Structure formats: structure tokens, C-alpha cells
Image: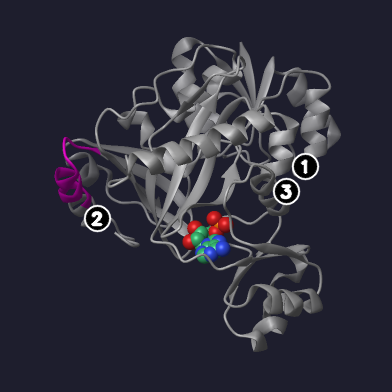
Amino acid sequence: MKIGIFGGGQLGRMMALASYPFNLRFSFYDAAKDCPSAPLGQLFGDTQASVESLDAFIASADVFTYEFENIPVAWVERIAAQKPVYPSVKSLAVSQNRLNEKALFKQLAIPAAAYREVNSPDDLIQTVQELGLPLVIKTTMGGYDGKGQFVLRDSKDVAQAWAELERGAPLIAEAFVTFERELSIIAVRSQTGEVRCYPLALNTHHQGILSHSIVPAPQISAATKAQAEQYITQILNELDHVGVLTLELFDTAQGLYANETAPRVHNSGHWSIEGAVCSQFENHMRAVAGLPLGVTEAIRPSAMINIIGQHPNTADILAIPETHLHLYGKSERSGRKLGHITITASTYQALQERIAQVAAHLPNKMAL
Ligand code: AMP
């Protein structure tokens, strides 16, 4: 079976690497000829994003999926009219728009920050009066790694917030959530509706970019785990989602708050390649191909550390026991995700010691 993957970044590359052993083969749609997935399959796409290039891609595979959500819904609809696409157009349309996501949380009674749609500076002033300060202002579409965001702490900065983000309008203004830590849960749903959840990840960000994750997140009560699993299962079922979905959460004194969803494998799930019985990448491809799901349990405590901007010395990292290096074949650039390192250990304390060893060899230590 040939799977067409929309997007040829590192996520597509890891999906292909995980499912090559059970004889799936791949084509990718990405205009960049040197994208991380290029060595692993046939590459389609042009810089004009022409319909002809999309149709050639559609002709190249049996079943389709995507590795990022910032693609036009109309394109996925065009694929869906001819061949199966997982996750569904509905999953994509909800996850790529923050207003749709928040409406879904509300519909499913999943707690989330109070919010308003903002179409003008006047709307923003009105929202400050209704929700108070600080507010987190975000573009409704297209933002990632903290881009397209402004934390409004003083109403005299309304004009500045609007000027910085207006090109991404409509905007969403969210009440600031005071959280103790950031968590995420990843789950996979099969074509028959079976849902399996990975353990919660504890995520640390630096300058808006994920720095590292620890999984299973330490000190999670059974109630919190059950709550997170219930929320993501509700979302998966409501969307009739097939494949992996990620739910980012704020852990607060009042319980879990949903932040956002991603209809795909996620950076906070990269640990699962070595740390789980079946990785998020393999499980996504199993679901897309209509195969049985794999076990989502963690084998041991794991850490995933992102390599951002500059490469470490490969031999230095590989010399550290129980440590795995994944490089995406990208050139160095400030703020760019170039790879990640997974560490597994028998205890959390041993994991922390290994993290410190890895950190000593990273040119860009971020928040480690
Ligand atoms: P996002 O792109 O929505 O994941 O936001 C990026 C980061 O900004 C999150 O990981 C949080 O650290 C922070 N953030 C986003 N929304 C809020 C909010 N409503 N309250 C507090 N912090 C937020």
C-alpha cells in the first residue's frame, strides 16, 4: 500500500521510517526538494502549489494523510473526493482554526480559557473590559512555536498588539491561564473507532518553542490522567478522527484546561520511538492503513530534548548510554528544529542525570 503524505518535514519522515518495516511505501507533497522526507519516497509539489501538482500527487498513492495542519481545506477536500484521507476534513478544519477549536471545547464541556473573536482594535478594547488583563492575543490560523502571539498586559498596548498581528486577522483574545505546568496527551483512533492513549507528557518551552518533554509526566494523579484521557477521547469521537491527535493542556489549581489540538503526530510524542511499545508514528500509519493499533504504554521513563538551531557533535551524544539521536537532515538556522534526542532510563533520577549529560554537549541549551 502506498500512503500519500501531505508535507515532507521531519514528521512525515518519521511516519515513513516507522512503517517502512511493514512494507508501506510513500509519496510526499512538499515544494522543497531537499525536505527531510525526500530520501524516503516520491516527491511532488511546486512553488506555485498548482492543481496539476496536487492531482499528480493524488494519482501517486492509495490512501492519504498529512503531517501539518496549515494546508488549505479545499486541497484535502479535493483528495477526499477521489481517495481516502485520514484524519478527516472535519478534523483538519477544526484544528487549523483556534476559534473552531475553542467552540469544540465548549460544545464538549472541556474547560478552556475564556475567549473572544477580535476583528478590530475596538473589539480588543471591548474584550479587555469583558475578560480583563493579561490577555493572550493569537492569530486564529497559521501560528506555530509561539509565532503570531502577543501577551497584552496593559490596555495602552492595544494598538501595538493590533498592529503586530492584524495581518493574521481575525484574531482570538484569550484570558491568561495561570498554570503550574504544561502537559500534552496524544492518542490514536483506528478506522473501527478504537482509541488508545499515550501517557501524559510534561512539556517545557523556551521562547515559545518546545525545549523538552518528560514522559510519563511525573506526579500525575489517577484523576488527572482519567480526565485527560476522557477529554481527548471525546474530541476523537466527535471528529470521527482516524490517526493520531494531540491535545495540549494547562495543569492548573482548578484542574486541566485545554489549550489546543493538533490533528497529527506531535513533537511531545517523539519520545515514543524508543520509549513506548509502539510509537506515535507507527500507530498513526497503522490507523491510516486500516491496520490494528499497537500498545501505547511507556516502556520506561523517557525524555525528549529538541535540538534547536545548531547541531551537537554526533559522537558526543551517542557516547551517552541509553541515548538516541534523531537528525532531520536540515541546515542550521536560529530557532529551527534540527533533530531531537531521546533518553530512556530505569528511574526519573537516572533520567535527570542523563539529561544533564546531554545538556553539557548541546550548543543551544535552551531551558534544560
Ligand atoms: P499555543 O501556540 O497556543 O500553544 O501557545 C504557545 C504557548 O503560549 C503555550 O505553550 C503557553 O506557554 C502560552 N500560552 C498560550 N495561551 C495561553 C493562555 N491563554 N494563557 C497563558 N499562557 C498561554
Q: In the picture, residue 128 is in which quadrant? A: bottom right
**Residue plotted at (52% across, 17% down):** 286
**Residue plotted at (59% across, 62% down):** 147
At mark 2, the secondary structure is helix
Question: What type is the residue that disc 1 sits on?
Answer: Pro
Residue 256 horizontal/vertical position (percent) = 47, 51
Image: 35 above or below 253: above
Check disc 2: other Cα within 10 Å, few if <14, some if 14-19, many if 20+. Answer: some
Look at the image and tell me whether residue 335 can be seen: no
Circle nearer the viewer, 3 or 2: 3
Q: In the picture, residue 359 is in which quadrant? A: bottom left
Mark sitting earlier along the chain (3/1): 1
| Residue topped by disc 3 | 100
Which numbered tag is attached to residue 359? 2
Which numbered tag is attached to residue 72? 1
How is colour applied across the structure in the image?
one colour
The span shown in magenta is 344-355
Question: Alpha-carbon distance for marks 1 and 2?
Answer: 39 Å
* Quadrant (top left, top right, bottom left, bottom right) of the N terminus: top right
From the image, give the main secondary structure of the stretch colored magenta: helix
Q: In the picture, residue 245 is in which quadrant? A: top right
At mark 1, the secondary structure is loop
Residue 162 horizontal/vertical position (percent) = 73, 76
Mark sitting earlier along the chain (1/2): 1
**Residue plotted at (54% across, 14% down):** 24
Residue 85 painted magenta: no
Question: What type is the residue that disc 2 sits on?
Answer: Ala
Residue 354 painted magenta: yes
Side of 48 relative to 265 (left or right): right
Question: What type is the residue that disc 3 sits on?
Answer: Asn
Residue 86 horizontal/vertical position (percent) = 66, 25
Mark sitting earlier along the chain (3/2): 3
